[in-house]
Amino acid sequence: MLDVQRAVRMVRARASEWKVDPKRIGVWGFSAGGHLASTAVTHFDDGKADAEDPVERASCRPDFGVLVYPVIMLDKPYTHQGSKRNLLGDRVNDAALVEDLSTAYRVTEKTPPCFLVHSTTDAVVPPEHSIEFYLALRKAKVPAELHIWEQAPHGFGLGNDKNPPLKAWPDRLVDWLKVRGVLK
């Protein structure tokens, strides 16, 4: 998480040098990386105004998140236990940490807009993870879009040739990014 926060700060702090828009910086993650992306959009700050390092003065809040079959909840019957162990190590029974890293609980009105993709038949990370996050975004009135395909295994990436409709989800993401003003 600290690396993602530093990366967002770095891009924002050096945006003019790198000729990027500092208001169009997002995070994107798949599966456990989806958890990392969901953590970035729910655990952020506005920067440390008094920091000696100019990069640390920049906000680490992403402007949008793309979460693809993300691990979100660590306290539900459908929790992916391997991810929970990998994230928490010997602290798997630390209730406060489990709640803090169950990122749907951390959604607020300041959470950036998110695009979520999942499948009904994901046997590794069930779609309830994306559904919980989407509902939390909706409750906080954060713009969000959720796509759940009926048939696709976990790890479908950008789509596959055996499922032509699934190959369309990156196009839906492009549409969403255009509507959000991220892409021109």
Image (tube, rainbow, N blue to C red):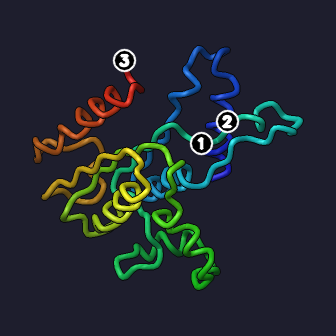
- Marks 2 and 1, how far apart in space? 8 Å
Residue at x-position 43% and y-position 64%: 72
Looking at the rendered structure, the secondary structure element under dot 2 is helix
Identify the residue position indicated by label 2 in the image: 9
48 relative to 138, above or below: above
User: Amino acid type of disc 3?
Assistant: Lys
Q: Residue at x 64, y 45 (%)?
A: 5
Estimate the spatial distance between the alpha carbons at disc 3 and disc 2, rounded to whole Å.
23 Å
User: Mark 1 is on which residue type?
Assistant: Arg
Mark 2 or 1, nearer chain start: 2
Q: Residue at x 55, y 21 (%)?
A: 21
Do the residues bearing badges 3 and 2 touch, measured as CB atoms within 8 Å?
Answer: no
Q: Position of residue 103 (x, y in %)?
A: 50, 63
Q: Nearer the viewer, residue 31 or 56?
A: 56
User: Which residue is label 3 attached to?
Assistant: 184
Q: Which mark is residue 61?
A: 1
Query: Which one is earlier in the sequence, the residue at label 3 or at label 1?
Result: 1
